[in-house]
């Protein structure tokens, strides 16, 4: 009965695609956008890590890596910016998305902080449809779920399989954080179910079904894995590969990665490794060290299993003759996650079971995942906003550029601009008779083609939970917000000090003032509000919900 229901949903979706999708022009590349969740900057092998990621490493070797690609510091702001080509506040998610447990929690009743993706935005799917693309999504949505009009199919996607909320159990996703197929909930009954595998299964299925319908029409796939976001859950056979790998602790791993990244040309040897930001491994009891090594092993297995699944997708593309003219972009949504305290959260007895939800590996391991950068998810120092980016496109990237490292900086809104550039899609500044902001980014297609030079000559900015940053050229001004503490901007020359250890704010006061003024002008024109006001709204919402 379940499979019959899925087939009916599929046929209805296909009818919609056939009736409304413009005819595609031949030769346009397929586009696959893959995003991991809460992974550290240096976790992949091709970015200095020890985790086995041969598929992504292979795509990097035959493609291009960006060493300075920036995210939005947190799951939902990143997704809002990515999907819309705007800053997150412009898209209505300046803080977080309303969770399934309380649809009003992050609605602060001001335009930039509604807790859902604004209807006065265009999504990647809506834009690429203007160029004849079939639009497919599997994985994590996290852009609003209270009303069906906020869901993927109502925001331009032809097919969707995944979770609407921000996280779920990997083995047993269940309401209210369960699985949705198109617009219908799906009950998971398979005892071997694992979300990373299922998201990939449906990605391949959706592509195949579309090819059967019309092989000439290009497709866009947005594959948003939840891995390796908590809960720490992975197949035991994959965990076994790493069971003894982390017995030396986080400091040893961090030193190992730092040297490897220098050797690979990912970082400059003149950038010092910042002081450790975790506990002393040797002071932990033997039993605690064993538990922490296991937490890290499960995390590594989550990344490993994701890479294996990307391999299955790549194999399908090759088998079906789609690989050569498919642009694959891989990114991560924010820096490594330090949530759960220094030693992680969740009951140790739930590790290696199918139980549990908030199971994390903690700040000490996150510090190693973000080698060599400072801070984590939530913050806007380099460790919070730096993402690995891999671009692979055999038909579009010249052979002379393959394996290249791009050190020019780029950020999330550039992806919309790049996809518009590649597809010749139409992005308009009007929707339903109302204005839509212009794209905030610039195309990095010239960088993929081998042209040198910066793509940004204007400041790019961040704000999340009061943490602020602005970058122009080599210089970055950044502030870490702390409640009831004075606000202090720092200034760094990232060409000489990307690990942000030498604050130039006291020496180059004029440059700092200029960058701060640019940030304040941006905030005033992009629906950014003082965090103290938004924090008051959040607390009021939580108080209301707890009554």
Image (cartoon, grey):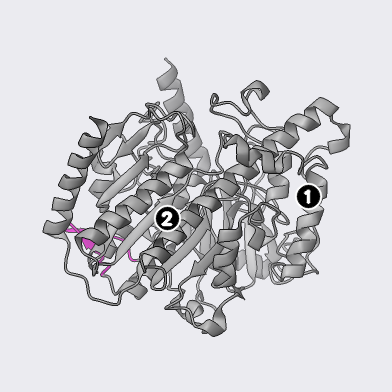
Density class for disc 1 (Cα within 10 Å; few <14, some 14-19, many ≥20) is many
Residue shown at the point (41%, 35%) measured from the top left = 106
Number of the label disc, if any, that sits on residue 81: 2
Foreground residue, 41 or 490?
41
Callout 1 secondary element: helix
Taking depth in this image into account, of 62 and 530 the one nearest to the observer is 62
- State the residue lying farthest toward the top: 547
Q: Is residue 209 above or below residue 250?
A: below
Q: As drawn, is 438 to the left or to the right of 191?
A: left
In the image, residue 210 sits, relative to residue 393, either above or below, namely above
Q: Quadrant of the C terminus?
A: top left
**Percent x, y of residue 55:** 56, 60
Decide whether residue 358 is among the magenta residues.
no
Please, what is the dominant secondary structure of the magenta stretch?
loop
Residue contact between numbered discs 1 and 2, judged by CB atoms under 8 Å? no
Q: Is residue 411 visible?
A: yes
Give the CA separation, mark 1 to mark 2. 32 Å
Q: Position of residue 326 (x, y in %)?
A: 39, 69
The boundaries of the magenta stretch are: 426-438
Label 2 crowd bin: few (<14), some (14–19), many (20+), radius 10 Å = many
Give the residue number, with chain letter if any, for mark 1.
253
For the N terminus, which image quadrant?
top left
């Amino acid at each position: 009965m379940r499979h019959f229901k899925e087939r009916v949903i599929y046929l209805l979706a296909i009818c919609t695609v056939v009736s409304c999708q413009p005819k595609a022009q031949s030769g346009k590349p397929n586009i696959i956008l893959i995003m991991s969740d809460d992974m550290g900057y240096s976790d992949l092998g091709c970015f200095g890590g020890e985790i086995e990621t041969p598929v992504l490493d292979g795509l990097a070797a035959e493609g291009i890596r960006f060493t300075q690609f920036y995210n939005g510091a947190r799951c939902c702001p990143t997704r809002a910016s990515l999907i819309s080509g705007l800053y997150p506040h412009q898209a209505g998610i300046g803080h977080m998305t309303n969770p399934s447990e309380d649809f009003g929690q992050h609605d602060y009743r001001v335009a930039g902080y509604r807790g859902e993706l604004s209807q006065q935005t265009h999504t990647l799917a809506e834009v690429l449809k203007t160029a004849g693309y079939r639009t497919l999504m599997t994985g994590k949505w996290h852009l609003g779920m209270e009303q069906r009009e906020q869901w993927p199919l109502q925001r331009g996607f032809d097919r969707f399989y995944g979770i609407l909320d921000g996280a779920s159990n990997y083995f047993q996703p269940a309401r209210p954080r369960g699985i949705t197929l198109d617009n219908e909930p799906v009950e998971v009954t398979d005892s071997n179910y694992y979300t990373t595998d299922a998201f990939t299964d449906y990605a391949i299925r959706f592509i195949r079904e579309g090819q059967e319908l019309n092989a000439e029409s290009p497709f866009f796939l947005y594959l948003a894995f939840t891995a390796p976001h908590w809960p720490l859950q992975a197949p035991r056979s994959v965990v076994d590969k790493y069971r003894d790998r982390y017995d030396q602790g986080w400091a040893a791993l961090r030193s190992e990665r730092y040297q490897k990244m220098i050797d690979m040309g990912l970082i400059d040897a003149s950038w010092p490794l910042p002081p450790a930001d975790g506990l002393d491994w040797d002071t932990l009891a033997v039993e605690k060290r064993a538990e922490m090594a296991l937490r890290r092993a499960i995390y590594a297995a989550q990344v490993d299993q994701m890479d294996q699944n990307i391999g299955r997708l790549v194999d399908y593309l090759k088998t079906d003759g789609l690989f050569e003219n498919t642009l694959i972009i891989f990114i991560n949504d924010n820096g490594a996650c330090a949530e759960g305290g220094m030693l992680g959260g969740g009951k140790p007895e739930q590790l290696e079971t199918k139980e549990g939800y908030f199971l994390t590996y903690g700040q000490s391991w996150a510090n190693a995942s973000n080698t060599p950068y400072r801070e984590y998810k939530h913050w806007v120092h380099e460790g919070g906003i730096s993402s690995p980016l891999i671009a692979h496109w055999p038909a579009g990237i010249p052979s002379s550029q393959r394996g290249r490292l791009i050190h020019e900086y780029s950020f999330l809104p550039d992806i919309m601009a790049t996809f518009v550039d590649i597809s010749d899609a139409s992005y308009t500044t009007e929707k339903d008779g109302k204005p839509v902001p212009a794209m905030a980014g610039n195309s990095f297609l010239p960088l993929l083609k081998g042209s040198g030079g910066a793509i940004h000559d204007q400041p790019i900015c961040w704000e999340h939970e009061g943490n602020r940053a602005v970058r122009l050229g080599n210089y970055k001004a950044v502030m870490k917000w702390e409640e009831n503490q004075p606000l202090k901007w720092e200034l760094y020359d990232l060409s000489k000090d990307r690990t942000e250890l030498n604050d130039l704010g006291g020496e180059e006061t004029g440059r700092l003032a200029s960058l701060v003024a640019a940030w304040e002008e941006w905030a005033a024109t992009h629906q950014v509000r003082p965090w103290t006001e938004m924090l008051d709204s959040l607390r009021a919402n939580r108080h209301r919900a707890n009554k």
